[in-house]
Amino acid sequence: MTKLLMILTSHKEMDGQTKDTGVWLGEFTDPYYEFIDKGYKVQLASPEGGEPPIDKRSLLTENITPSNKRFNEDSRAQLEFRNTLPLSQVKPEEYDTLFYPGGHGPMWDLAEDEQNAEIVLHFYEQEKPIGAVCHGPAALLKAAERKPELLKGKRVTAFTNLEEKAVGLYDIIPFKLQDRLKELGADFYSASVPFTSRVENDGLLITGQNPASAGPAAKALIEHLEVAKAIH
């Protein structure tokens, strides 16, 4: 059975602002059910453990996805979500692959978390695939500072500067994720129309641009794993 580690943010407030943040629910639930329905065993983790905060904007009617509704009726998934494993207790060698949902939260905690960086580097050095969507790629930054080849020359995508401006957070976020990825040597690509799906697949690194890309990014990761399994 394929074992997948999904790391969520623990950060709930935009520093110095009244705006809340956290996990964008659909970027968790869309991939989660893609993995569960494929028969994968999914372990949820976060820097602090316990229940991650949810960005309230992701609960607005226009942002609800079918997987959100499924999650609302899934007591087992809710229990797992309320009891994420602290990163200090994660043993990365136990997992076959790693996935990061978004929400703006990772820009504050996972982007700077040393334990998270160690986990990323384990997966990279063991040539195990890593997936991330929207602001999830922020979780790769600290590891890439230590091992530049993680991102250098890799095709990636993430929530764009244009999308940040559109949601009114361009001047609030601690850094521009698109710019930071490019500074670390990544080849950044985005959809021609903001907020539409875009997935970049560069070998062991699979990234999705925005909420619409969450399910497709998970499917791309599954495809990579299944092809690798068939070869071996």
Image (cartoon, rainbow, N blue to C red):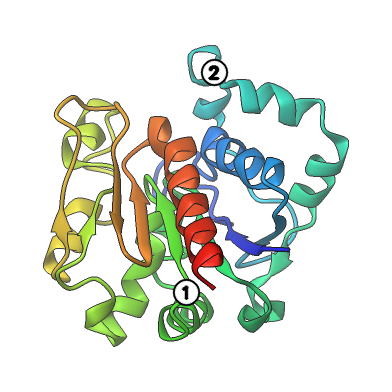
Residue type, numbered disc 2: Leu
Q: In which quarter of the image is residue 164?
A: top left
Q: In this view, does 191 lie above or below 9?
A: above
**Image marks 1 and 2: residues in contact by CB distance under 8 Å:** no
Q: Is any part of residue 18 visible from this angle?
A: no
**What crowding class fits label 1: few (fewer than 14 Cα within 10 Å), some (14-19), or many (20 or more)?**
some
The secondary element bearing badge 1 is classed as: loop
Task: Tell me the residue at 35%/63% (across/down).
Answer: 205
Provide residue 187's location: percent of width, then percent of height.
13, 59
The secondary element bearing badge 2 is classed as: loop
What is the CA distance from the residue labelled 1 to the residue labelled 2? 30 Å
Provide residue 150's location: percent of width, then percent of height.
29, 76
Frontmost residue, 196 versus 41:
41
| Residue wearing tag 1 | 113
- What count of labels does the image hold? 2
| Residue wearing tag 2 | 60
